[in-house]
Amino acid sequence: MHIRADGFIVAFMKLSTIIEKSLNEQLALELSSAHVYLGMAAYFEHTPFSGFARWMEVQYGEELEHAKKFFKYIAERGGKIKLQSLSEPKSEYKTALEAFQVSLAHEQKVSAAICALYELANSEKDFATVSFLKWFIDEQVEEEKNVGDLVVKLEMVGDNRNGLFQLDHHAGKRGQKS
C-alpha cells in the first residue's frame, strides 16, 4: 500500500492501464445489463405475465450487484472508475419467448466479454484480476443455464395458455425463500 502526496491510499497491486480500461468497460456492460433487464421487466408489467416481470426484476438486481463488484474491485486496486452513459433499453417484445431469447443472447455476450477479460488478465499476468474474474465465469454458467432453461420451456409450450400460465407462475417464485 502506498500513500500519495495528496493523502490518498493506493493499492499495492495497481491495475495496468489496459486492465483498468477493460474493467471499466465490463462495469459499463454490467450496468447496461441491469438496464436491459429493467426494460424487459417494464415490458412484462404491461402483460398478464407478472411472474416473468418478477423474474426480470430479480435479474436486474443481480446485474446491479455484479456492477457493484466491478466498481469496488477497480477502486480496491487503485484504479479510476469511469462511468459511461446507458442507452435506452428495448421494452417491447412480440412474445415472452422473444424477450427470453434476447436475454439469453445478452448473457452469452456478457459471458464472452468476461472470458476475454480473463484472457487479457492472464496475458498481463494480473493474477489478482484472474482470481476476481473466476467468480464471474462460474456465475455466467448459472446465468446462461437459468435463462436457457426458460427459453427451452417457452419453446415447448408455444402459445399454450395453460403452459404459459404455469411457466409465468413458476418464474414469479424466483428469489423467494423456500
Image: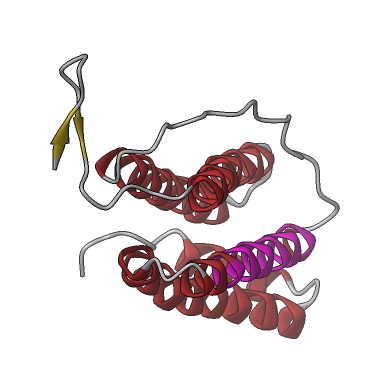
- In the shown orientation, is residue 146 left or right of residue 39? left
- The percent coordinates of residue 7 (x first, y second) are 15, 17
- In the shown orientation, is residue 15 left or right of residue 87? left
Region in magenta: 98-116
Q: Nearer the viewer, residue 10 or 28?
A: 10
Q: Nearer the viewer, residue 91 or 124?
A: 124
Seen at 20% across and 24% down, the residue is 4
Seen at 32% across and 47% down, the residue is 14
The quarter of the picture where residue 173 lies is: bottom left
- The percent coordinates of residue 150 (x first, y second) are 60, 75
Seen at 42% across and 43% down, the residue is 64
The quarter of the picture where residue 135 lies is: bottom left
- The percent coordinates of residue 61 (x first, y second) are 40, 46
Whether 116 is drawn above or below 44: the answer is below
Residue 92 covered by magenta stretch: no
Residue 99 covered by magenta stretch: yes
Say which quadrant the C terminus sits in.
bottom left
Whether 154 is drawn above or below 20: the answer is below
- The percent coordinates of residue 9 (x first, y second) are 17, 30
Q: Specify the principal SS of the magenta part.
A: helix
The quarter of the picture where residue 139 lies is: bottom left
